[in-house]
Structures are given as C-alpha cells and as structure tokens.
Image (cartoon, rainbow, N blue to C red):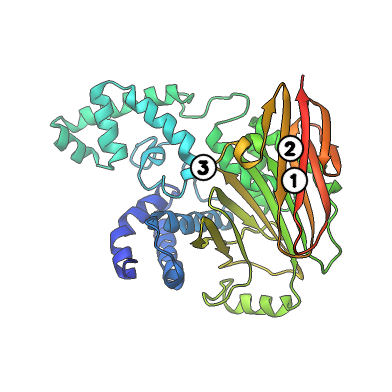
Amino acid sequence: MKAPFDAVVEENTAWLYRFVRNRVGCRETAEDIVQEVWLRAFRVYDSYVEDGRIRHWLSRIARNLICNAATRSPQMPWLSLDDPAEDDDPLYTYLSDGMSPEEDVLRQELIGEVLAAVAKLPEAQRQVVTFRYLNGLSVEETAAVMGIPKGTVKSKAHYAIDEIRKQLGLDADTGKTKKRKGVSTMECKEMYKYLFMYAMGKLPDETRAAVAEHLKECKVCADIVTALEKLIPTMVFAEEGEMSHYGIDFFNLNLSYVGVRTPVPDYAERNRQLEEWNGRIPDDQCWFECGHNDLVTTIGTFDNEGNEIDYPVYKTVEKNCRHKAVSMKKVSPDMWLHDCALSTDSPDVWWGITKEDHVYHGSTFNYFGGHVKSALYVAIPANAKNIRIKRGNGVIDCGTFKFAYVDRYVAEDEQIALDFTYTLD
C-alpha cells in the first residue's frame, strides 16, 4: 500500500538531503534542490505506482535537478567519486546508501569493486569503513560503537581509504583517477548520455566543455564520438511533418541512443503554455511519452537543441517502464526526443550477438506501432571482416566503428529487422 505523502517526506528528507549534499558543494543549493524534489514529487505522487523503490524514484528527480542546477551555474562545485566530502570523508559517494537506488545500472560495477576492496581490509579498518560509510555513522558515533578514540577512527579510515583507492586504480596521494586507456568506467557511464548530442554539436556550452575535457583522456568515449560524428551525416530522416525514428546500439558497452521525431502542429500554443507554467507540464497532461523494457534504464533525454528534458519513469506495466515529460524548455514543430539508455543484459541476450566457429552473429529489430521512417544501426569493431548483411541495407565504415544498418519506412503493423554476421582478425 502506498504511504501518505507526508509520511514519505518525514521518512526520506534526511536521506534525500545527504544524497543531494554529497553531489553539490553548496548547502543552500542542496536545500533548494531538496525542496524542489518534494514539490515535484507531490505534484505527481497520485500517479506514482508503489513498487518498494521510493528512493529510486526520488533520486532520479534529484539527479535531474542537480544536472539542471549545474548547467545554470557552471561555478557550482562537483563532488567526484574520488574526491573528499566536506568533512574529509573520501568515497562517501561510493558507499552511502543514498547513492545506490537510482544508480543500479550505472553504479553496480563500481559498487561491487568497492565492496570487494572493503572485504580485503584488516578487520579493524573494515569495521570503521562499514560503520562510517556503509551505515553512515559520524566519527563520534563510530568511536562510541567500536569503543576507540575518535582519532583512531580517523586514522583507520584514512589508511583504509588509501588501500581502497589503490585497489580501484586511484592515486592514493591525489585522489585522482590514474590515466589508463581512458578514465574510470564510472566517469564514462556518466558521460555516455551526452555523447550523441555532443557529436550533433547541440549541447549547451558548459556541458560541451566538460565532455570535451573527458574526451581528451578517454579513448572509449572519444571513439564513440568519432564514429557518431561520421555516422550522423549519413542518417536520412523522413520529410518534415512525418515521424522519424533511429536506434544506435553499441552492444559491447550495453549502450543505446534512440531518437523519435514527432510533428507537433500546436507547438506555438504549447510554448506559450510552457512560458506561463515556467517550463513545467501539468500532472494531468501528457505531451510526450515513451516506454521500454525494464531491463533498460534511460539515463538522459534531450530536445532538438540539446536541452535535457525531465522525463522520469511515472509508472510500470508488465515489465514495461513508462516515461512522461514533466518539464522542458521548448517544443519544436518537428519535436525530437533523443534518449540515451543502458541495458543490464549481456549482448547475447539484448542484441542477439553470439559467436560460433569464429563467426559473430548479430540480430536486432524494432516494432514502432505506427507509420514511421525507421533506422537501426549496430556498432561492430572497426577490424571486423567478412561482414554479411542477411537482412538490412549494408555497412557504414565510421573509422573507430563500423555500423551494420537497416533504414526504411515501416507501416503500423510492420517491424524493422537487422541480421548480420562478421569475423575478426
């Protein structure tokens, strides 16, 4: 049974403040964001379907607001995964309970590595880390529970954090991610949502600058952008006033970019309403909606001009998550919604990538449910050879990746499918 809203607020406000506070560097900003989270949650609480993951829902709202705040104020400091918090508690953002509900897909690999590192610590250090970071106790509380001085708690925490950093490939002296063939997996997963819009040249200046800095150190993301910059000009969409759809899958990363363009005849009136409503769409109205399998997590949605849209999950139906736009900056006459999503499944499950006798087989399809110009692209390694398209149009060589693709109009009752094989050197 769904709890009364005031009970949800009472039970989760302290947790929500910690969740936000450890992602922004300003106490006043954190307090403002928490208030806005509760305001937005209240507006749509009647439509929220209780599934035992209330913090998952709240943290998604909070993350969107944090991103919006960062865009509006480029001077707002960010707390990275390996930086110390205000009270010199490094790794708090890895380990606090407030981090994990929303970040199941994005954080599960990192959290597993952290917990494995914690398990290898000496017993006393492991206890300090458990009390301080997993259970969220203060230094004083940890000292009282363990029966040791506060200074000992701080000392053991310090040495434990250094050891964890070493095991995670972080520099123990600077706390910065060591240079590798790129940067940390977590940083990449946080950047993925911006890469398509970056390749389109559509991001706001502040966000674009942050992505550019990441690309200087990360070959994985740089290769994605290089390929997208070559692929995008080859993509042919429907005429204006017609629906268009694309799907681009990087199966080795469980990463997808999906876009849908929809004609909006009354866009001028909707923009007038957005201005009147300060960019927020009333709860009883559904302007833009989409759905996907619950094995996929949408991590970002953008409009024609690269503005991020607040597009949270508002209900689930038979393993299907429904998203509805709740706030946006602008509606265009041919409105694009560009999504970035991550899948929790392995490539052989989600994209049908299998290997048999040194030959890789790939298969994917989409059923749109309406008349649309649809295209599917699957990234395969740049060194792929003997590529054969069984169903589809062909292959586009984009340097760092090749893309098997299919591109055509489909009717309401048709599906579009792509089947291909290739070998590797």
Where residue 345 sits: x, y (%)?
Answer: 56, 40
Residue 137: image quadrant is top left
Q: Is residue 397 above or below residue 205?
A: above
The tag earlier along the polypeptide, 1 or 3, is 3
Mark 1 closeness class: few <14, some 14–19, many ≥20 residues within 10 Å:
some
Q: Which residue appears at 24% of the width and 23% of the height? A: 123
Most foreground residue, 52 or 13: 52
The tag earlier along the polypeptide, 2 or 3, is 3
Q: Which residue appears at 42% of the width and 69% of the height? A: 45
On-image quarter of the N terminus: bottom left
The three-letter code of the residue at mark 2 reads Ala
Distance from the alpha carbon under mark 1 to that under mark 2 = 16 Å
Nearest to viewer (mark 2 / mark 3): 2
Q: Which residue appears at 66% of the width and 40% of the height? A: 351
Where residue 299 sits: x, y (%)?
Answer: 57, 50
The three-letter code of the residue at mark 1 reads Ala
Nearest to viewer (mark 1 / mark 2): 2
* Residue matched to label 2: 379
What kind of element bears circle 3?
Answer: helix
Can the viewer see residue 374? yes
Can the viewer see residue 305? no
Q: Is residue 18 left or right of residue 377?
A: left
What kind of element bears circle 1?
Answer: helix
Q: Is residue 347 left or right of residue 425?
A: left
Mark 2 closeness class: few <14, some 14–19, many ≥20 residues within 10 Å:
many
The three-letter code of the residue at mark 3 reads Leu
Q: Which residue appears at 86% of the width and 40% of the height? A: 394
Kindly identify which numbered label has been placed on residue 199: 1
Distance from the alpha carbon under mark 2 to that under mark 3 = 21 Å
Mark 3 closeness class: few <14, some 14–19, many ≥20 residues within 10 Å:
many
* Residue matched to label 3: 106
Q: Is residue 60 above or below residue 87?
A: below
